[in-house]
Image: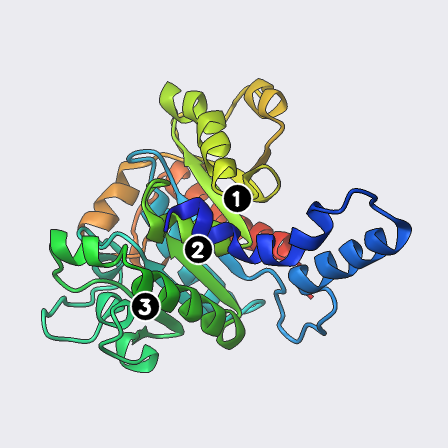
Amino acid sequence: MGIFDKLSKTAKDKFGEIENAENFSQSAQIKAVDIIKELSGSTTEQTKKIPDNVIVFTSTSGAGASTLAANVAYAASNDPKLKLRVALIDLNIMFPAQNIYFETKQELDLPDLVTYLLGKSTLGDSIVNKGNISLMFADNKEIMDSINCESDIAIDNFTDMINKLRSLYDLVIIDCPMKIDHTLCNTAFYLCDQIYLVWDEGLSSIANAEKIRRNMAVTGIDSYTKMHIILNKRTNVKYTDFPFKKLNINLAGILPFDPAIIDSSLKSQIFIEKGASKSENANTFAHKIYELTNTIVRNGGLI
């Protein structure tokens, strides 16, 4: 079963009867609206602080998505005005980063994200708690583990996991590589409520943005309404708004570059927690992380 078939099955089941009707009558239109409301969850009373609380951080290459995901997770869980319960999932199966940021050792025999996806451990056993943040990542896995995570059972378990975490946590953050052609990553993009695509100053970030959205749309991902851009590693906070107008895409935040941020990552530190620097850019970065976090929860419908 291909990605498109897997992700579009529900839509086909729901809309098949209407799609094949020759006369789209008024009653059929009412039925379609009711179905859309049901699928969107608008007919269900929301009890969470953030209705759309599953977000993805991603980038094409080296733009700092993992660093931002870790810092936003820390900000969301430690900001006195928020104090959110945060789940942070690292979908980089072979080369995870979040365990490094949060100083969590990898051990081969421990239950982890992969053992859960393959049905070999429970959700609770596969989570590592660090303060107010619950982490899920892969422990010392290799290429066959990554391949196995593309199986139907792994995707079904991942879908079930996201649905459970959505109700258990205030904010679910997925650190996801830009692998649209991989079923696991594609499913994360499909299931999430907001996608934060991280750009650096490189031309490829801008040049590939529309290509990314088009390819996501092919597999049923609503990339044109739920994608936002974060400008990261800016050596100059000034920017032209032409790309955003041209692409009709929202700019969620701008964060400056500073060597202290890289140094903090190399020391397995969350910069806004333990990073030390007196530079203006470093202080601006810390301030902007909290601003970005508040923007993210507002985009999710904070109530």
Depth check, mark 3 against mark 2: the one in front is 3
Disc on the earlier residue, 3 or 1: 3
Report the amino acid beneath label 1: Gly
Give the label on residue 47, or none.
Answer: none
The residue under label 2 is 72
Residue 124 in the image: x percent, y percent? Answer: 33, 81
Q: Secondary structure at mark 1?
A: loop
Residue at the extreme right: 26
Q: Say which residue appears at 35% left-offset and 50% top-offset.
A: 183
Residue 284 in the image: x percent, y percent? Answer: 45, 42
For disc 2, the neighbor class at 10 Å (few under 14, some 14 to 19, many from 20) is many
The residue under label 3 is 135
Give the alpha-carbon distance from disc 1 to disc 2, as whole Å. 28 Å
Disc on the earlier residue, 3 or 2: 2
Q: Say which residue appears at 30% left-offset and 44% top-offset.
A: 261
Q: Quadrant of residue 180?
A: top left
Q: Quadrant of residue 40?
A: bottom right
Residue 236 visible, this orientation: no
The residue under label 1 is 220
Left or right of residue 258, residue 144 in this image: left
Q: Say which residue appears at 80% left-offset and 58% top-offset.
A: 31
Left or right of residue 110, residue 66 in this image: right
Q: Secondary structure at mark 2?
A: helix
